[in-house]
Amino acid sequence: MKVLSVLATAVALTSMLGCAVDIASTPAASAASLGVTLRGNVHGGNQLLGSSRIYLFAAGKTGYGSASTSLLQTSASGVTTDLSGNSYVTADANGNFTITGDWNCLNASDQVYMLAVGGNPGLAPGTNNTAITLMNALGTCNSLNSGTFVILNELSTVAAANALAQFYVDPTHIGA
């Protein structure tokens, strides 16, 4: 029965065609050393997702479903902050993105994940499907390096949803 629940959650995450995702407020990261440059690409099916908002989070540590921490430095070049105070970079028209080293984890063992929200799946220029939400669980902060290339698509979303289902409340509340 749990498998069916996890699969239902994964399907819901990958087929959010009529549901908007509200990125909830999370505290900003501080203190630790700066991260490395991360690059990646966002796809929806065979379509590139241009102009997606790319978020980098560390999972919460204060209980199941606790608030995740936004890792991008708000003062960094190319970083924008949403209405909830979470920082993101924007993918280019081909779904490519770069997160410079202007991010940090509080601890090397922090569990890190990435979200892609919205974007244009090949529709008319300027179109933004705000119902799209994709994710990828990246592992521990200290496992990321300048060679890390992150793909955000339905497959990475299903894998992350399956692995994180017991710790998940919504995209910004994943913790234990």
Image: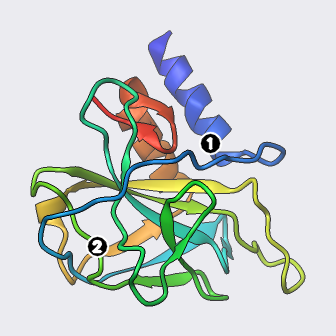
Up-down relation of residue 90 to residue 144 (above or below): below
Q: Residue at x 31, y 39 (%)?
A: 60
Q: In screen coordinates, is 140 left or right of 160? A: left
Other-residue count near label 2 (Cα within 10 Å), few / some / many at <14 / 14–19 / ≥20: many
How many numbered marks are there?
A: 2
Q: Quadrant of the C terminus?
A: top left
Q: Nearer the viewer, residue 154 or 91?
A: 91
- Asked where in the image residue 129 lies, by quadrant, the reply is bottom right
Up-down relation of residue 166 to residue 15 (above or below): above
The residue identified by callout 1 is: 13
Q: In screen coordinates, is 44 left or right of 18? A: left
Q: In screen coordinates, is 20 left or right of 134? A: right
- Asked where in the image residue 142 lies, by quadrant, the reply is bottom left
Q: Position of residue 71 (x, y in %)?
A: 33, 63
- Of all residues shown, which one is farthest toward the right? 124
The residue under label 1 is which amino acid type? Leu
Q: Position of residue 123 (x, y in %)?
A: 86, 77
Other-residue count near label 1 (Cα within 10 Å), few / some / many at <14 / 14–19 / ≥20: many
How far apart marks 2 and 1 lie (CA) works out to: 26 Å
Q: Position of residue 54 (x, y in %)?
A: 51, 69
The residue identified by callout 2 is: 103
The label shown at residue 104 is none
Q: Residue at x 66, y 36 (%)?
A: 12
Q: Considering only order in the chain, which callout, 1 or 2, is on the residue closer to the N terminus?
A: 1
- Asked where in the image residue 42 lies, by quadrant, the reply is bottom right
Which element type, helix, strand or loop, lies under badge 1? helix
The residue under label 2 is which amino acid type? Trp
Up-down relation of residue 17 to residue 130 (above or below): above
Q: Nearer the viewer, residue 175 or 69?
A: 69
Which element type, helix, strand or loop, lies under badge 2? loop
Q: Position of residue 72 (x, y in %)?
A: 37, 70
